[in-house]
Image (tube, rainbow, N blue to C red):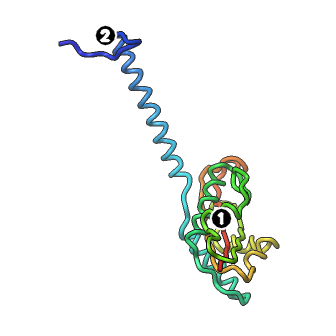
Amino acid sequence: MAAVRPRRNGVRMNGPRATSLGIAVAVAVLVVSVLLAGSAAATLRTERSLPPLNRQLLAAVNRFRIAHGLVALRESAGLDSSARQHSFEMGRDGYFAHPSADGTAFWRRIRRYYGAGRYSYWSVGENLLWRSPKVGAGRALRLWIASPEHLRNLLTPRWRQIGISAVRLLHAPGVFHGLPVTIITTDFGVRR
């Protein structure tokens, strides 16, 4: 009984040519699979969230606010999601700015995660930072305090909630010049 070979242009192919074509297709599929898997693994190895730093930043921001007579901020899942999306996007796309990569204003991005919905009052703000991978909560807070715009966000009395996302990249593209960096997005909000 003869083996059935792949058809080419409707003609059954037999012999060494069919075998060579089959091997070439199998090798191509294997190469593409390895490249895709390698790319996914590289992303996982080079980009990771830093939950301990997120918690340390939350504690540092709240200590600072309380020391200035302001209320401590509660963590918001929606603001966390907005901050996480933005930190990862900036790292992946190699830019550093409040607007999203597509030019969307920061408050519109945040509103997708932290909606105004049925609230009569809604307001948000954002602090960003990128530094060497070893930046800690204390250093990040000091850098924000040294900047009038960032300090104003830290000391805004109306904020009630916060979302924080610190992301570490081993080889950040674009404005980060392929260097290892930590990118931090902190989103502030209030709705009532």
Q: Residue at x 41, y 23 (%)?
A: 25
Residue 69 x %, y % = 72, 90
- What residue is shown with label 1? 110
Could you tell whether 101 is left or right of 79 in the image? right
Q: For mark 2, does the 10 Å Cα neighbourhood hold few (<14), some (14 to 19), or many (20 or more) residues?
A: some
Pointers 2 and 1 in contact (C-beta within 8 Å): no
What kind of residue is marked 1?
A: Ile
Q: Position of residue 6 (x, y in %)?
A: 34, 17
What residue would you read off at disc 2? 14
Q: Nearer the viewer, residue 121 or 59?
A: 121
- The label number, if any, that marks residue 186 in the structure image: none
Q: Nearer the viewer, mark 2 or mark 1?
A: 1
| Element type at mark 2 | loop
Disc 1 residue crowd, few under 14, some 14–19, many 20+, Cα 10 Å: many
Q: Earlier in the sequence, mark 2 or mark 1?
A: 2
Task: Please report the residue visible at 73 percent of the width from the left and 74 percent of the height from the top.
Answer: 142
Is residue 10 something one can see in this rendering? yes
Above or below residue 93? Residue 71 is: below
